[in-house]
Amino acid sequence: MSVWTIALNTYRESIRNRVMMNILLFAIGLMLLSMVVGEWSLGEQAKVIKDFGLSAMSIFGLLIAIFIGIRLMVQELEQRTIYIIAPKPIHRWEIVLGKYTGLALTLIVNVVLMSAVLLGISFFIEGVLDLYLLPAFFLIYIEILIIVAFALFFSSLMSPQLSAIATLAVYVVGHLSNFFYEYVQVYPDKGLHWLFKTLYYTMPNLEKLNLKMAVVEHLPQPPNAVGIAILYGLSYIVIVLLLTMIIFNRRDFK
Amino acid sequence: MDKIKTMWIRAGVAALLLGLCFTVYHTQCLLDREREIRFIDRVPVFLPNGKILKALSMGHYTSLADYFWLHSVIYFGRRAIDHDNMYYLHMLSSGDVKQAEHLKEDPAMHKETSGPRVSGEKQQQWVKNWHTAQSGKPQPPDSIPFMDSKAIPRIFDFPNFGTMDYIFPLIDRVTQLNPYFITPYIFSSVVVLSATGEIDWAIHLLERGYRNNAMRWELPFYLGYIHWIYKGDAETMVRYLKEAVQKPDCPEYVDGLLIGFSRNLKQEEITGLYFKSMLESTQNREIRERIQELLTRLESE
């Protein structure tokens, strides 16, 4: 019950956040702008709009995750509201889970809004509703949730600036995973191969959640590919959240 | 008293705002008049290969492919069809595309290109100069080893031979970043190839496209086109067409082409048939315009 109360509170708080509103408006503005840019693409306007729209959703989702996710914990510590919550009869893990759930609710509103705008624009251009895009929307949401989990994890450990850098690094490494894998395959005897192998298996492989090209080009996907990717993402989120809860539980607020 | 004071302050602020708006507008006009028309189609100094670009794109490789695609279209447009790009025409008239950057240092150049657009007469003069300059320069090979007909080579004049070194490398990056994006393959094999005459590049890109999109009939169809028209290789053309007709969704007119070839139609007739099939094969306006232009030239020969 207390998790849900904290979640709703967090949701109300972050939905009113100006930074998030600005990022959201900017993302929607960029999607609209891509209509103009798409006109220069020699008949590929719809494709360009979808590509840029999906990228905008992912990038601005990342920004929201970093700005709001890190602020969630830091704000509690800086404004000292954590001292009011901590002595109450709620577990610390409930605070972490509540905060995370609240932000996940906020992000789902954002993703749904951006998806609706993108679908609307593509419908306006093509005259058909491209439902192929739906799995990509869903996986972008899962990707953002992983980044939020990391933002929360780092912000319970480090300063806000360092947390932002570390979260961004996770995003970068997460998208370079395939490169690490290829490196290990091609150069199994090279010096850095153990490092790349460790990174590949410990960092989230965000490329597994990247369906942008497949949905825009209508490429056939292996059966259950989306389901397995969702399971992978959710498992990863649970691991990071559990670690955050353990750290938060041990943290001394005095 | 206070009311009057407030009124004066408000009037003063309004006057100041109006004055500032006028200043902004006027200075903008002044800057426009003095501005230098820049050489817009800059070529990239360093273009990393597709694999590096893919790693750098952080999962947004389709958007990066689109960016390079737009860049290719603009680059091609500036060099091939933008006849009101005065700086470029003047640069062409001076003879060397690669020296374009140095022209920016030439005060005479700035005199010619600053201010509003140059008159139509001036423009025509520059175009004329350009054609004169071209006559003394290395020309594209008598490029098409095309059989016994004299008509076919004449429909390809490769107007941009040697003037757009970066167009194929740019499209190459597009297709490396997104190998499933079909339009660049077709654009390069019809529009760009007929402008530049770089046959090997076009074949290289189409072959890559075919490897990555083995079920698409358009790619063997256009590979057949290049081998037939530009290389005079009927055998390879027939092989590719036979592959194309086996693909799903391959339209009937491709079969018609094969039948026409087996009936020993004249080369011009088969070529005409090919162009008509190509017109059917794409809805892209720019590509269709170029094919129509080639078809009209063929028919007028």
Image (cartoon, rainbow, N blue to C red):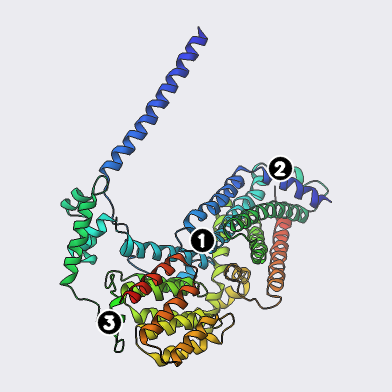
Q: Is residue B164 left or right of residue B215?
A: left
Q: Chain of mark 1?
A: A
Q: Is residue B198 visible?
A: yes
Q: Which residue is the site of mark 3? A: B143
Label 1 is placed on what type of residue? Gln
| Residue at left offset 38%, top offset 86% | B228
Sequence-first tag of 1 and 2: 1
Label 2 is placed on what type of residue? Thr
Q: Chain of mark 3?
A: B
In the picture, which quadrant includes the C terminus of chain B?
A: bottom left
The front one of B125 and B113 is B125
Q: Secondary structure at mark 1?
A: helix
Q: Secondary structure at mark 2?
A: loop
- The answer to whether marks 3 and 2 sit on the same chain is no
Where A114 sits versus A205, above or below?
Answer: above
Give residue A253's position: percent from left, percent from top: 70, 49
Q: Residues within 10 Å of mark 2 (few under 14, many from 20)?
A: few
Q: Is residue A175 left or right of residue A150?
A: left
The front one of B279 and A125 is B279
The front one of A22 and A202 is A22
C-beta proximity under 8 Å, tags 1 and 2: no
- The answer to whether marks 1 and 2 sit on the same chain is yes
Where B269 sits versus B280, above or below?
Answer: below
Label 3 is placed on what type of residue? Ser
Give residue A229's position: percent from left, percent from top: 68, 71
Q: Which residue is the site of mark 2? A: A81
Q: Which residue is the site of mark 1? A: A45
Q: Residues within 10 Å of mark 3 (few under 14, many from 20)?
A: some
